[in-house]
């Protein structure tokens, strides 16, 4: 592979609304970028508050090339704007603002987009405004081949060609990495960089004309002084090929210029996180056996290695032939000293048989030799130690050969060992075959990055040469994979082409390649038939990306005629069609968060564009300990069995545990880590039954599907910082027969913040969704369709992994398995939720009624005193209410939940004793698969519920119409009385202080029951007599 060097490119496009600095209302700005000790600057735009540069600035990443460093390693990038004092001198600070970008915001070339960053202050007293538009990306460039070293020249010629040094200057070093000639130097020895510390930045000498772009000299790196002997300097900087003798040593040290070493780079977001220490789960001891290779075996043999311990055995695949017979496979047997597992001996044998052959009935000639180890003498290895070295062992017992060796390593470890992930486990399904156990290993998956593809259909021209029938219409259809959307059907305008100005939004997944095309077609609809006129395709890789609400450039597409259209038209002479042109605007929106999860269970709210991501605020650690009391999911050999595995999802990262075969109490003890960008997110963990690796032909398709056994959701905002929550969560599955408990899953969760508590609290004041959701929101009718499309794309991507994450498991985790219709149980549960959430209103009304009824005379007397106090001091009302709410919160602190709330809640879901008919209706498909009689009965019940809702809406409308009838004069007597009463009340309030009115009204409301009448108040009687529109409804 050719050597490459990684470059960071900063395209400084423009700035907007800058601050004037020259005293005449303008500025002459230029931009300066600093990265990893390198500095570049743009040209100066004279007297312009909205300058446009459109200049790319290149920087080199530290390190030898892309092969040894991370793509986004390096220091933060700083881009600052200054006023050029050469064009217009100023007494004010020439600093106009700056932007600092973290290395996490750097993207690869092809993913960049124009982003406008608001300019930031340098200090608290700085005054800046405006923003700057940048494109920041990195790319790998091939290194030029090194030229052959030139022949050694005589010293005399070398002395003639070399320029004479200054009298008082020391020999200057040779620059190992020269900068481009188009850059200029802005720093000098012994002085700080201009614009950083000084009030005004002094341009370098020799820049030429300050207005026009000037040729620049070589940009030197930042320098510092270092005293070294001159002999060492000359020896280190002279090429090795040069045979010129070194100069005589000088006893006194001479200063030289050396580049400032770059500061260590911050870790990028996608670097592999530190391997988990497995401190949240139980340690599981294992006996590891690594079989590497063999030598001295017969040349025509097809050997495999069989490892047996404690009654369990496994076989390698057939050896790869080369200089040796290669396997390089690892086996893990669970150790339990209490029951002497895996036994006192470990047997490793080599057989000249297929891996799936039965060696118990094999001929002795197939046995090539074996080894026997005492498990008590196996060396124990801890994860901080390095890998155990393999060793050659002489095979014994083979009759066909002598002198054969097998390279093996054995050690005792835990699941924290790095070899555990790819090792064969004794509790895996189909344990007798190594290849069959590959699909049951623990794996980590990553969802694809999803973008919104926005198609704006503006208008069409030259689509029809003849007028179509009167009832015909024209529509535009967009197709991206399985997604198809259509604009409204517009009648043909005889005076011009049809116009729509309508947006169609699709979901697209990276990576975008040239073969992925977005198809736009124009069709004429006549009656129930659609006739395609023409179509055009656009490559997804060529579509412009944006991260804000700016308008992208529109384009005219030439629609190619469709042969299918000509075949369909046939004899319809009135419709002679050809392609025509279509005016559209297409872009990839990276400022949106494309959700594949339901809103109540979202684990990530970041936008698609990586440049807009915030730094993580913490780390989430999850330990999946195991399950207890699982129910059998299938029958095998006359008994129930369950092959369970767990799936955890947070953000784009999925974690799948290994499959444990035939166990109702599986113990995984696996630990995973996620970065956290928002504390108000949800972690989802589901447990599934893995289908068998090989099924009989009569098992059917359903037996090969992973069946869910329940899931648990934990909201991170309910977890305390740094605290470990370990406990068992019930696995409850809603079935057509009702809620069923499938067992318990034991989890250990810890959420640790990486910053201060203020950083986490600051997140609560930030918008949940990115800015584009508020600047240009997506219609609510399209959100669920886009979510289901995103879920389908993510599931298809995960299914292409090896081993794949099963489609049905991923769909069930995303709540996108199948659309559910109306559920009376959920309607009743949501009503109870609303009642419980508003229970404080009922409690306040009940307390007021008890106080008004004088059931506690002391409390009623104190209420009178508080009423007088608040009436005379109304400024105490708000502080009193807030103090009361704070007291309630402090009082309930002692009853706060000590652990995350269990999910799901059977009582809140109204699933304790559900009606069987309601559950059957809830699980019915759309369209219904039931008989006509059942559908008719459900329709009649829905009509009864609709009648109740109709009456409720009618009552609300009646009260609103009575309120409007007070001044509508529909009832002249009532309206007249109301107007006179309003005049009287206004005159009284003009003359009587408001404090007195409030106290009198309060005392009247709290009067003793002996002064009240049981009949309704006159005001209520008056309101109930007002007219409404009820009698006019047919």
Image (tube, rainbow, N blue to C red):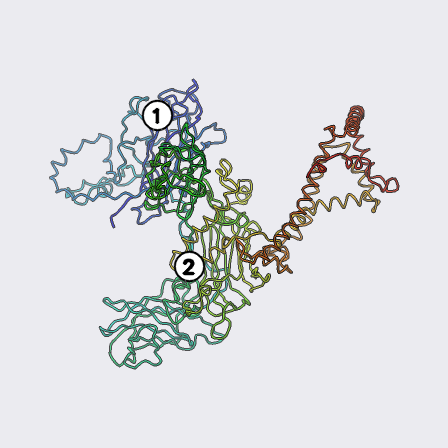
Q: Nearer the viewer, residue 283 or 952?
A: 952
> From this viewpoint, which residue is outermost toward the right?
1010
Q: Position of residue 901 (x, y in %)?
A: 60, 55
The residue that mark 1 highlights is 44
Residue at the image point whose x is 36% and y is 37% from the top: 573
Asked if disc 1 and disc 2 are in contact, CB closer than 8 Å, the reply is: no
Which mark is on residue 207?
A: none
Residue at the image point whose x is 45% and y is 55% from the top: 654
Q: Nearer the viewer, residue 978 or 948?
A: 948
Which mark is on residue 443?
A: 2
Q: Is residue 458 left or right of residue 562?
A: right
Q: Position of residue 563 (x, y in %)?
A: 32, 43
Q: Quadrant of residue 1003?
A: top right
Q: Is residue 27 left or right of residue 889?
A: left
Residue 440 vertical position relative to residue 908 in the rendered view, above or below: below
- Closer to the N terminus: mark 1 or mark 2? 1
SS label for mark 1? loop
Q: Is residue 700 left or right of residue 599?
A: left
For the C terminus, the quadrant is top right
């Amino acid at each position: 592979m050719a050597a490459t060097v990684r470059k960071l490119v900063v395209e400084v496009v423009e700035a907007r609304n800058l601050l004037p600095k020259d005293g005449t209302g303008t500025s002459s700005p230029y931009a300066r970028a600093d990265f990893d000790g390198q500095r570049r600057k743009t040209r100066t735009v004279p007297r312009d508050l909205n300058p446009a540069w459109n200049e790319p600035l290149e920087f080199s990443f530290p390190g030898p090339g892309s092969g040894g460093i991370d793509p986004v390693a390096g220091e933060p990038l700083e881009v600052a704007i200054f006023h050029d004092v050469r064009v217009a001198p100023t007494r004010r600070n020439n600093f106009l603002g700056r932007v600092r970008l973290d290395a996490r915001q750097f993207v690869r070339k092809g993913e960049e987009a124009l982003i406008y960053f608001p300019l930031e202050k340098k200090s608290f007293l700085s005054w800046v405004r405006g923003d700057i538009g940048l494109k920041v990306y990195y790319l790998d460039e091939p290194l030029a081949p090194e030229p052959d070293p030139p022949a050694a020249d005589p010293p005399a010629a070398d002395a003639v060609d070399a320029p004479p040094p200054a009298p008082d200057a020391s020999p200057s070093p040779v620059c190992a990495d020269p900068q481009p000639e188009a850059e200029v130097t802005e720093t000098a020895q012994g002085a700080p960089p201009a614009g950083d510390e000084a009030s005004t930045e002094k341009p370098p000498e020799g820049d030429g004309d300050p207005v026009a772009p000037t040729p620049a000299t070589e940009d030197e790196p930042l320098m510092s002084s270092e005293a070294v002997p001159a002999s060492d300097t000359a020896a280190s900087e002279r090429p090795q090929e040069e045979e010129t003798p070194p100069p005589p040593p000088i006893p006194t040290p001479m200063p030289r210029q050396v580049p400032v070493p770059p500061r260590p780079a911050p870790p990028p977001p996608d670097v592999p996180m530190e391997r988990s220490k497995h401190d949240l789960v139980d340690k599981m001891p294992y006996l590891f056996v690594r079989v590497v290779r063999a030598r001295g075996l017969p040349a025509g043999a097809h050997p495999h290695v069989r490892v047996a311990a404690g009654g369990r055995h496994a076989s390698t695949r057939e050896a790869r032939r080369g200089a040796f017979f290669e396997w390089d496979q690892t086996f893990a047997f669970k150790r339990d000293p209490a029951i002497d597992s895996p036994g006192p001996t470990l047997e490793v044998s080599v057989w000249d048989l297929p891996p799936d052959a039965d060696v118990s009935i094999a001929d002795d000639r197939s046995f090539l030799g074996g080894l026997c180890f005492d498990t008590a003498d196996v060396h124990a290895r801890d994860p901080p130690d390095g890998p155990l070295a393999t060793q050659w062992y002489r095979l014994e017992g083979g009759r066909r050969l002598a002198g054969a060796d097998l390279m093996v390593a054995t050690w005792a470890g835990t699941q924290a060992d790095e070899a555990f992930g790819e090792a064969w486990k004794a509790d895996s399904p189909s344990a007798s075959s190594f290849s069959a156990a590959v699909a049951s290993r623990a794996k980590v998956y990553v969802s694809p990055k999803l973008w919104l593809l926005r198609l704006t259909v503006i208008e069409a021209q030259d689509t029809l040469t003849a007028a179509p029938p009167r009832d015909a219409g024209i529509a535009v259809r967009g197709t991206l994979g399985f997604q198809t959307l259509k604009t409204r059907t517009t009648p043909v305008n005889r005076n011009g082409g049809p116009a729509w100005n309508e947006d169609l939004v699709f979901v697209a997944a990276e990576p975008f390649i040239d073969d992925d095309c977005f198809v736009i077609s124009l069709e004429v609809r006549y009656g129930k038939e659609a006739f395609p006129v023409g179509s055009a395709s656009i490559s997804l890789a060529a579509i412009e990306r944006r991260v804000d609400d700016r308008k992208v450039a529109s384009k005219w597409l030439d629609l190619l005629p469709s042969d299918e259209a000509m075949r369909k038209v046939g004899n319809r002479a009135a419709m002679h069609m050809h392609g025509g042109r279509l005016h559209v605007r297409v872009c990839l929106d990276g400022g949106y968060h494309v959700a594949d999860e339901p809103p109540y269970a979202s684990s990530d709210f970041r936008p698609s564009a990586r440049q807009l991501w915030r730094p993580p605020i913490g780390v989430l650690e999850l330990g999946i300990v195991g399950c207890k009391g699982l129910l059998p999911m299938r029958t095998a050999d006359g008994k129930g069995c369950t092959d369970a595995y767990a799936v955890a999802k947070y953000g784009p990262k999925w974690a799948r545990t290994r499959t444990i075969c035939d166990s109702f109490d599986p113990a995984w003890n696996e630990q995973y880590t996620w970065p956290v960008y928002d504390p108000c997110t949800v972690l989802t963990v589901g447990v599934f039954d893995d289908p068998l690796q090989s099924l009989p032909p009569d098992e059917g398709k359903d037996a090969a599907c992973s069946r869910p056994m329940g899931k648990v959701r934990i909201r991170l905002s309910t977890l305390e910082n740094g605290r470990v929550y370990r406990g068992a969560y019930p696995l409850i599955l809603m079935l057509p027969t009702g809620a069923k408990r499938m067992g318990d899953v034991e989890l250990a969760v810890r959420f640790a913040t990486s910053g201060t508590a203020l950083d986490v609290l600051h997140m609560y004041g930030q918008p949940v969704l990115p800015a584009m959701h508020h600047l240009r929101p997506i219609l609510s009718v399209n959100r669920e369709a886009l979510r289901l499309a995103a879920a389908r794309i993510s599931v298809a991507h995960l299914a292409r992994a090896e081993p794949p994450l099963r489609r049905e498991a991923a769909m069930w985790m995303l709540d996108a398995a199948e659309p559910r219709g109306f559920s009376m149980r959920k309607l009743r549960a949501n009503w109870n939720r609303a009642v419980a959430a508003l229970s404080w209103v009922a409690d306040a009304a009940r307390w007021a009624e008890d106080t008004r009824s004088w059931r506690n005379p002391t409390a009623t007397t104190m209420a009178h005193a508080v009423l007088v106090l608040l009436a005379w001091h109304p400024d105490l009302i708000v502080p009193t209410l807030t103090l009361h709410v704070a007291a309630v919160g402090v009082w309930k602190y002692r009853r706060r939940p000590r652990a995350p709330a269990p999910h799901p809640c059977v009582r809140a879901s109204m699933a304790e004793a559900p009606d069987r008919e309601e559950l059957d209706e809830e699980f019915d498909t759309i369209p219904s698969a039931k008989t006509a009689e059942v559908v008719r009965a459900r329709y009649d019940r829905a009509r009864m519920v609709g009648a109740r809702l109709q009456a409720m809406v009618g009552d609300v409308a009646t009260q609103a119409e009575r309120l409007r009838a007070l001044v509508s004069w529909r009832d002249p007597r009532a309206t007249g009385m109301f107007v006179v009463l309003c005049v009287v009340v206004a005159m009284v309030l003009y003359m009587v202080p408001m404090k007195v009115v409030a106290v009198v009204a309060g005392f009247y409301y709290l009067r003793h029951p002996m002064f009240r009448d049981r009949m309704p108040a006159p005001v209520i009687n008056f309101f109930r007599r007002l007219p409404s529109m009820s009698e006019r409804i047919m």
